[in-house]
Amino acid sequence: MYDEEHILRIEDLKVEFPISIGTVRAVNGVDLELVRGEVMGLVGESGCGKSTLGFSILRLLRPPGRISGGRIIYNGHDIVQMGQEELLALRGSKIAMIFQDPLTSLNPLFSIGEHFVETLRAHEKGISKKDALERSEKVLESLGIAGERLREYPHQMSGGMRQRIMIGLALILNPDLLIADEPTTALDVIVEAQFLDLLDDLRKQYNLTIILITHNLGNVAQLADRITVMYGGTIAEVGPAQSIFDEPLHPYTQGLLASIPNIKLDQPELKTMPGSPPDLVDPPAGCVFHPRCPYVMDICTKERPPVFARNGHRMSCWLYR
Ligand code: SF4
């Protein structure tokens, strides 16, 4: 059923990777909705499941990874149930993704123009090369890159330009949802800030909904409307971005924010969270965060917490029952 308010609804999603010593439960019962036009920051430590969740939305999991349960409803259609043809039509033209390292995503033997023409022709069979190049030029210029650079090759571009080209390739088919997986990892801090400004402009210009996957909380502070905090393949907390920074409620979110260095505070030592992320082959019983939680209670070690709501946030934590 079409949902006016939400472009995407994820319900009880489970993703697993069978390996020799067992099954990695990378995403373990995730529920999440995306409001049309918002930027959702998806954050958490490495291995928390955020990138796996992003790849699952486009069914781009590498074998043996597989979706083992749940639904991903995009504009009323369940992506989990889609056949290959429907999926191919969805990828790029409705939902696009940009990746961490633009250099490995671009073919060094193809000019930038050829990348755009191939992308357009994969979805619009009859389009002429001339029309494809004209459209590509417009997109490139909207990203601040001169149209004539379509003739150049990836190695002739700087890191920031290559990332903008990846965005251009993602936008050329006019998608309404963009998943950006750690898009600024390969950029220096100045280019990174420019890139986030550009993403903000494009979101308005192209009426985009964006999922920004990052371990960098500074990035989400700059761009996101809401933040989802993941831990151990589950969602710890979801809430409005500013409110998550001002008043984090889940103990994991509190620990994550406390471990960001703050030059305004007199901090002789950097705070760190004790312990390490859970083993997803054999995750802790009950709340997956309980071995590291300073507020752990008896129930936390036995029963997985349901979702509770408070102050506009939703937390999976027994403290809020
Ligand atoms: Fe801590 Fe218990 Fe809340 Fe988990 S459910 S975060 S262990 S208080």
Image (tube, grey):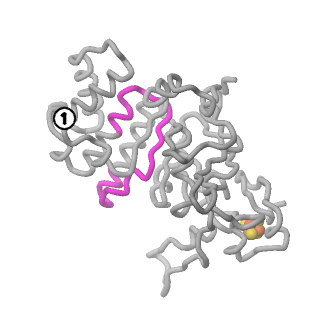
Q: Residue at x 65, y 40 (%)?
A: 10
Identified by mark 1, the residue type is Ser
Q: Is residue 170 magenta?
A: yes
24 w.r.t. 180: above or below: below
Residue designated by label 1 = 111
In the rendering, at what x and y percent does residue 22 appear? Answer: 63, 59
Q: Residue at x 33, y 40 (%)?
A: 166
Residue 89 in sight here:
yes
Give left or right: position of 125 versus 10.
Answer: left
Q: Residue at x 38, y 35 (%)?
A: 170
Name, please, the residue furthest toward the bottom. Answer: 268
Q: Quadrant of residue 165?
A: top left
Give left or right: position of 49 versus 68.
Answer: left
Residue 243 in sight here:
no
The residues colored magenta run: 167-194
Mark 1 falls on what kind of element? Answer: loop
